[in-house]
Image: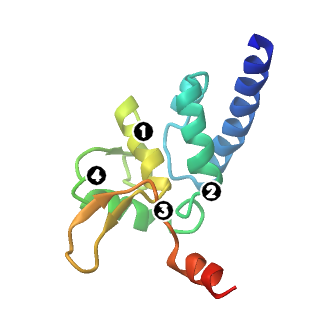
Amino acid sequence: MMGRNMHFHEAVKNVATQGLENIIETGLVENHEVFKDRIDEISFARKLVKAASKSPVLGQIPNEQVISFTNNHPALKGKFKYSYDGSQINLGTKKSQDLFLKLINDDFLQSELTKLYYESVAKDSIAESEKTQQQ
């Protein structure tokens, strides 16, 4: 049992490392080495796997737009520090690192109807659910 858990943890770390490479490639994060320091934390590594491998933000949305979003969204405003030129996010704290993973997972939403802001992990794509219903 213990050996199986060790192999599982190693597999998660390996995939998380690839996820980290995806983050590095975008150039969005100034100090990405902070993720390497936490990759042994299995819960963090699992979040990193999820966020970086299936991110609807990384490589899809221009970095300038992501940074602008972090400066304007009520849940993120003032939570991040930035590089000297403002082109990258500096993730010096665990809290900012966790928020960043939520950011690239597109967990910060605004209702079109009420204009209220939400944090949502479970997001069902309407286009996907309509496709499934039509079949």
For mark 4, does the 10 Å Cα neighbourhood hold few (<14), some (14 to 19), or many (20 or more) residues?
some
Mark 4 touching mark 2, by CB under 8 A? no
**Quadrant of the drawing holding the C terminus:** bottom right
When the figure is inspected, residue 100 is found, relative to residue 13, above or below; the finding is: below
Q: Nearer the viewer, mark 4 or mark 3?
A: 4
Q: In the rendered structure, which disc, 2 or 1, sits on the residue that comes first in sequence?
A: 2
Give the left or right position of residue 93, taking residue 58 as reference.
Answer: left
Residue placed most toward the observer, 67 or 6: 6
Residue type at the position of mark 4: Leu
Q: CA distance from mark 4 to mark 2?
A: 21 Å
Give the left or right position of residue 10, taking residue 124 as reference.
Answer: right
Q: Nearer the viewer, mark 2 or mark 3?
A: 2
For mark 1, does the 10 Å Cα neighbourhood hold few (<14), some (14 to 19), or many (20 or more) residues?
some
Residue placed most toward the observer, 117 or 99: 117
When the figure is inspected, residue 124 is found, relative to residue 132, above or below; the finding is: above
Q: In the rendered structure, which disc, 4 or 2, sits on the residue that comes first in sequence?
A: 2
When the figure is inspected, residue 100 is found, relative to residue 110, above or below; the finding is: above
Which colour scheme appears in the figure? rainbow
Q: CA distance from mark 4 to mark 3?
A: 15 Å
Q: Which mark is residue 54?
A: 2
Residue type at the position of mark 2: Lys
Task: Report helix, strand or loop for mark 2.
Answer: loop
Q: In the rendered structure, which disc, 3 or 1, sits on the residue that comes first in sequence?
A: 3
- Reading the image, the residue beneath label 1 is 98
Residue 2 in picture, x, y percent from top left: 74, 11
- Reading the image, the residue beneath label 3 is 63
Q: Please report the residue visible at 65 percent of the width from the left and 52 percent of the height from the top.
A: 53
Residue 26 in picture, x, y percent from top left: 59, 55
- Reading the image, the residue beneath label 4 is 76
Q: Nearer the viewer, mark 4 or mark 2?
A: 2
Q: In the rendered structure, which disc, 4 or 1, sits on the residue that comes first in sequence?
A: 4
Residue placed most toward the observer, 12 or 129: 129
